[in-house]
Amino acid sequence: MTEALVPSTQVPGGRRRFRAVVTAVVPESDALDAGAWRELETIVSRALSARPAAVRRQLAAFVRLLSLIALVRRRRTFTRLSAAERFLLLGSRSNSRLLLVRRGVWGIRTLAFMGYYARRAAADAIGYRACATGWASRTSPRPS
């Protein structure tokens, strides 16, 4: 798979639904351009490719379930809700009595955060400079 083209089937629930989740979890992602979205989706796609097919299916089903919940509760699909409404819906599901639903929310949130913050531009913007060589790679003095 190339970074230039990530099939929508590689992100949970399809590109449109997954982007709706990401913008609810990371509001700053709303300002991403097409290239940044491709990078985010590639990061998520690569992470999911290492997981069993059953896990990928469960995540996709959960994202579709969010749309169904939104339809029942708000009479609109998840993608049609405002970012604030999507955030509230995810928050309410993160407190569900059902462990499986709570796990779904945390799993999809983790993917959203990973996809957004693992991009080079996001790491640079927040000053993240982790390196495999540790502190030896830093040019500034070690904090006390």
Image (spheres, rainbow, N blue to C red):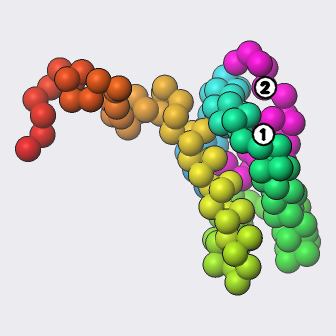
Residue 96, x across and y down, in percent:
70, 79
Residue 11 circle label? 1
Q: Please, what is the three-letter code of the amino acid marked with disc 1?
A: Val
Does residue 41 show up?
no
Does residue 28 show up?
yes
Residue 2 lies in the magenta stretch: yes
Dot 2 falls on a residue whose secondary structure is loop
Q: To which quarter of the image does residue 98 belong?
A: bottom right
Q: Please, what is the three-letter code of the amino acid marked with disc 2?
A: Val
Q: Left or right: where does residue 41 sit relative to residue 60?
A: left
Above or below, 74 against 60 in this view is below
Q: To which quarter of the image does residue 25 belong?
A: bottom right
Question: Residue at position x 69%, y 75% from top?
Answer: 99
Residue corresponding to mark 2: 6
Question: Residue at position x 83%, y 50% from top?
Answer: 54
> Disc 2 or 1, which lies upstream in sequence?
2
Above or below, 105 against 136 in this view is below
User: What quarter of the picture does the C terminus occupy?
Assistant: top left
Q: Which residues are magenta?
A: 1-24
Residue 9, x across and y down, in percent:
87, 36
Residue 76, x across and y down, in percent:
89, 65
